[in-house]
Amino acid sequence: MPGSDGGMPTAASTYNLLTISLLLGWILNPAVMASKIRVLYTGDPYPGVTPYIHMKVEPLLEVTPVQASTLHYAGISSDDIRRAIRVYMPRTYRSLVESYDVVIISDANTGSFTSDHHRWFKDSVSEGMGLVMVGGYESFGGVANYPSWENSPVADVLPVTVVPGLYWGGPMTIVNGEHVFMRSLPWSPNLEFMRNYESNIVKLRDGADLLAVVTIGSWGGRYYAGYENPFFSTWTYDNGTVFAMTGDWTPAGGWAFLRWDYLPDFVTNLMLYCAKRPVPQDLSLVHTLRKQVAMLGYRRLIAASLVDFIERFGADARKLLVALDEVDSARDRAAALYLDLNYAEALEAANDALRLMEEAELVAERSKREALLWIYLSEWLVVLSTCLICGFAVWALMVRHRLYREVGTTRFQ
C-alpha cells in the first residue's frame, strides 16, 4: 500500500526522547491517566513468564491482555480463547483506535481473529496507531502447520514479507545501533540470547529500517544457510509505526531473552517508540528508576494482602492503612513525575516512597503479630477448654463413678 506521500512507505522516523498496574490498582488523576500508553497485548500474555508481567507494573503503560495463541494452551482451552476475544477485543473499529495506542501481536494465531479484526489492525496503523508483531510458531509465516499471516491485511503493514513455514536460528548481530530505539538499550555480543536466537524467516521490505539480524546456521537448509534474517526491523506505514521482532519473547523460544536484566526497559521503550513518544536515552537513570518503581509496586501488593489478613482475624489495621496512604501519596508523586519524563525527580520521589514503604512494612509486621496473637490465644483457649472438659469427664466417669450404682453382695447359688 502506498505511504503517506503516495509512494512506498517511508523508513521509520527518528524520535527524541504497569496503569501503575491493574493488578496493583494504582489510581492516578485523569491528567496522568491520559498520558499513559494504552496497549492491546494479543497472543501469549500469559500463562507463565512473559513481558506482560513487566508491562502491567510499568507506570507508563496500561495493558489489556487478550489470549489468542492456540500453541500456549497450558490449561487454556479454545473456548477460553474465543471468550477472551469476545470479551476483551474492541467491539468496533472506533473503539480500537480511541482506546489504544499500540497493538501487540505476539505469537497469536491468525485464526483467533475475525476478518474485521484483521482489517482493523491494518486501518488503525494507517490512522496513526503503533503495531508490534513478535515471532513464534503462530506469527509471521507460521510453522509446524500453523497458519501463515501472509494473506492477512496485517501482512501489508509489516516491514518484512513473511516466508511460510520456516523457523531457524543463529547468532544475533546489531546492524543499526544508532537508531533511537536501539540506542536506548545496552546491547552487547556477549549477551546470552545474542549467541543463538531462533526466529521466523522473513525478508526485509524496501524502505524499512533493519536494526538487527540473525545469521542462519548451516542447519537452515541449502537456501537459507548463512542468510542474514531480519530480527528487528521497523518502518512508518502511512501514519503509524510498525516494529517486527521475528524471535519469540516468551519461554517457548525466548527463555534467554526473558532473563535479560534490561527486558523491562526493552518492552517499555518499544511501546514509547511505537506510540511516537520520546524514548529516554539516559539508560542508567531510567533503568534504576524502573527497578525502584517495580520493587515498590510488588512490595505494595504484599502489604495490601496483609491488610486483608489482619482484618480477617479481627486485629486493628488502621495504623497500617494510614502508613500505606503515605506510601501511596509518595508513589503517585513519583509516577506523575515519571509520566512527565522528569526522571531524576521521579527517582528521588520513588526512593522516598520506598523509605515510607519500609516504615509501613514495620507497621504491617507489628499488626501481623497482633493478629497472630489473637489466633494463638484463641487456639490456646480452645485447647485448654477441651482438655478441662475431657479431664472432668474422665474424673467423673472413672474416679467418682457418677454413672454407677452400688449393689449388694451376691453369692453363687
Image (cartoon, grey):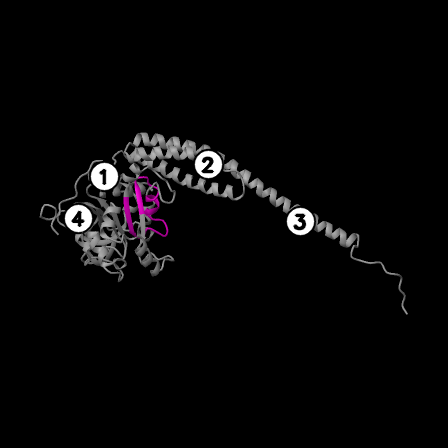
First in residue order: circle 3 vs circle 1: 1
Nearest to viewer (mark 4 / mark 2): 2
| Residue type beneath disc 3 | Thr
Give the spatial CA distance, label 3 vs label 4: 75 Å
First in residue order: circle 3 vs circle 4: 4
First in residue order: circle 2 vs circle 1: 1
Residue carrying label 2: 321
**Picture quarter with the C terminus:** bottom right
Secondary structure at numbered mark 2:
helix
Give the spatial CA distance, label 2 vs label 3: 37 Å
Which portion, as a residue range, is magenta? 38-63
Q: In the figure, residue 337 lies in which quadrant?
A: top left
Q: Which of 17 and 136 is in front in this view?
A: 17
From the top left corner, tell me how far across and down residue 348 is, in percent. Answer: 35, 30
Give me the residue at 70% from left, 50% from top: 389
Q: Do callouts 2 and 1 mark residues in contact (Cβ within 8 Å)?
A: no
Q: Nearer the viewer, residue 96 or 331?
A: 96
Crowding near the residue tagged with mark 4, few <14, some 14–19, many ≥20 C-alpha atoms within 10 Å = many
Residue positioned most to the bottom: 413
| Residue type beneath disc 4 | Ser
Nearest to viewer (mark 2 / mark 1): 2
Residue positioned most to the left: 6
Per the rendering, the mark at residue 386 is 3
Residue carrying label 1: 277
Q: Do callouts 2 and 3 mark residues in contact (Cβ within 8 Å)?
A: no
Judge whether residue 48 is colored magenta.
Answer: yes
Secondary structure at numbered mark 4:
helix
First in residue order: circle 2 vs circle 3: 2
Give me the residue at 32% from left, 39% from top: 59
Per the rendering, the mark at residue 106 is none
First in residue order: circle 1 vs circle 4: 4
The tally of labels here is 4
